[in-house]
Image (spheres, grey):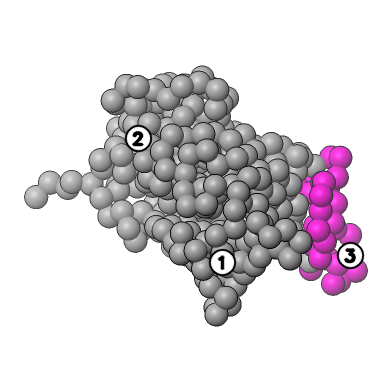
Amino acid sequence: MASTAVPFALVGSESLLGREIRDLAATSAPEFDLRMIETGEGGSAEDDAPAIPVALNAKNLSGARAVFLAGSPEANRKAIELAEGEIPLIDLCFAAEERPEARLRAPLVESLAGSIDGPSAGGDRGADADPDAASAGIHVIAHPAAIALALLLRRLQMHDPIRRAVMQILAPASEHGSSGVEELQQQTISLLSFKNLPRAVFDTQASFNMLARYGDQAPTPLEDTELRIERHLATLLALPGEGEGARMPSLRVLQAPVFHGYSFSAWVEFEGNPGLEAIENGLVAAHIEVRGAEFEPPSNVGHAGQSGIAVGAIAEDRNDPNACWFWVVTDNLRLAAENAVAVAREFL
């Protein structure tokens, strides 16, 4: 019997994001025939993958229904050139974000909002009305922090209109892929051994430290991440459908000394506080785990490998009767990967 598996190419199969795509494909998408393409970002996919990785070239992209971009910037750029606009791209690394044909995607938010067509990546162009838009062009997966906050705010807005909100976003080292995780690990070892610190990613001490800004020589400033989250969140909140009208929050990104998982300390002021029980009941939805006061609050470590977001430690603000505090966590790698796989399913 002929195989019914659909071929997809994964550029950067050995990266942290690539490994998440591979894991999801193996456990929940057996219909994917995943062609693994290594790009030298770090590690190897051979030890824990059922197929042998191949090189990045036109031949190995040929015939793919779509290409996941999860590799190094150089590899992603090369894959975009090789695809030549003929093979759809699912971009988890924002390599094609600035291209005019790119569309920002977050299926978990789109399903909550009831949206069919994703917005353009820039957020300032209308969604494509073409019925084949779901399978065409470049699909840029929204930043996982923006997806997490959009899920929270849109769900709250559905039941209790929001007046204003403030978000403190604690970023993990894995925001920078394997290089960020390895540098945080090496900094920790070096500090305990009284050695000089590696600084290629953060250009300052990130281990045992909280940062509002990286060093001047850091290749990717923390402000760039903050601006991208802000841009993507504004676009996701503007999607028509349920939860529409949620106000854009004030937000600040801080670098936390953790390896994986985003955490958020969220302050939300409502038009009128409905009470904690009503807020908790209204938040419960697909991809949103709510932990009441009788349960231990979620943590980035405890939520590792889990879908969606977890919300807990919900408490009324003692100084504002209409406001509440929320503690939110998500596995940034898993959240990005599950949205990418959801986009890929549209090609089936």
User: Considering only order in the chain, which callout, 3 or 1, is on the residue closer to the N terminus?
Assistant: 3
Write the residue at 59% across / 53% down.
272
Magenta-tinted stretch: 189-217
Q: Which mark is residue 295?
A: none
Q: Nearer the viewer, mark 2 or mark 3?
A: 2
Residue neighbourhood size for the residue with mark 2, other residues' Cα within 10 Å, grouped as few (<14), some (14–19), many (≥20): some
Does the magenta segment cover residue 338? Answer: no
Amino acid at dot 1: Leu
**Residue in front for this viewpoint, 181 or 245:** 245
**Residue in front for this viewpoint, 250 or 195:** 250
Residues at marks 2 and 1, CA–CA distance in whole angstroms: 32 Å
Residues at marks 1 and 3, CA–CA distance in whole angstroms: 49 Å
Which residue is identified by label 2? Answer: 116
Determine whether 335 is above or below 12 in the image. Answer: below
Q: Which mark is residue 195?
A: 3
The majority secondary structure of the magenta stretch comes to loop
